[in-house]
């Protein structure tokens, strides 16, 4: 698979994945509306609000584990500032709990 295809697949996975109902809260769909839609990661202002409410980040303290950190990765991949590293990038995507806290605080 080409690097460009892998980058696009990663962006699609993060920004337009299907809503998941009932995993965290059975009464609502767990969607990440702050990053919903193709290329919406560009709108991220890196304010850091999502960092402070992210349950995964508050355990790992890893910059790749909250929405803003993942947005930085996607932007760097787009600019070709970094190489796609499957071993490092893909696991951070799947650590997201889909709780929606980031979407609630995103300006």
Image: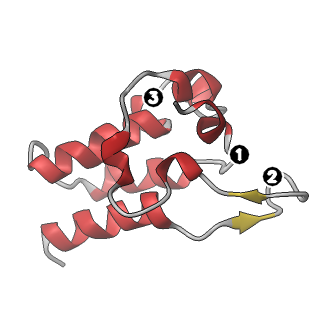
**CB of mark 2 within 8 Å of CB of mark 1?**
yes
Helix, strand or loop at mark 3: loop
Residue marked by disc 1: 99
User: How crowded is the residue under tag 1: few (<14 C-alpha within 10 Å), some, or many (20+)?
Assistant: some
Counting every numbered tag in the picture gives 3
Label 2, label 3: how many angstroms apart (C-alpha)?
Answer: 22 Å
Q: State left or right for residue 47 relative to residue 25.
A: left
Closest to the observer: 16 or 62? Answer: 16
Above or below — where is 40 with respect to 50?
Answer: below
Residue at 44% x, 59% y: name it: 15
Helix, strand or loop at mark 2: loop
Residue marked by disc 3: 62
| Mark earlier in primary sequence (2, 3) | 2
Residue marked by disc 2: 24
Label 2, label 1: how many angstroms apart (C-alpha)?
Answer: 6 Å
Coordinates of residue 104 in the picture (x, y in percent) = 66, 36
Picture quarter containing residue 29? bottom right
| Mark earlier in primary sequence (2, 1) | 2
Residue at 71% x, 45% y: name it: 99
Coordinates of residue 67 in the picture (x, y in percent) = 47, 39
| Mark earlier in primary sequence (3, 1) | 3
């Amino acid at each position: 698979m080409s690097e460009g295809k892998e980058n696009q697949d990663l962006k699609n996975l993060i920004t337009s994945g299907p809503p998941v109902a009932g995993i965290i809260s059975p009464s609502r769909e767990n969607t990440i509306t702050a990053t919903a839609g193709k290329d919406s990661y560009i709108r991220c202002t890196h304010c850091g609000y999502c960092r402070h409410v992210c349950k995964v980040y508050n355990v790992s303290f890893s910059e790749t584990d909250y929405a803003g950190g993942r947005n930085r990765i996607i932007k760097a991949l787009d600019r070709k500032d970094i190489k796609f590293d499957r071993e490092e990038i893909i696991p951070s995507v799947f650590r997201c709990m889909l709780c929606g806290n980031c979407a609630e605080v995103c300006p």
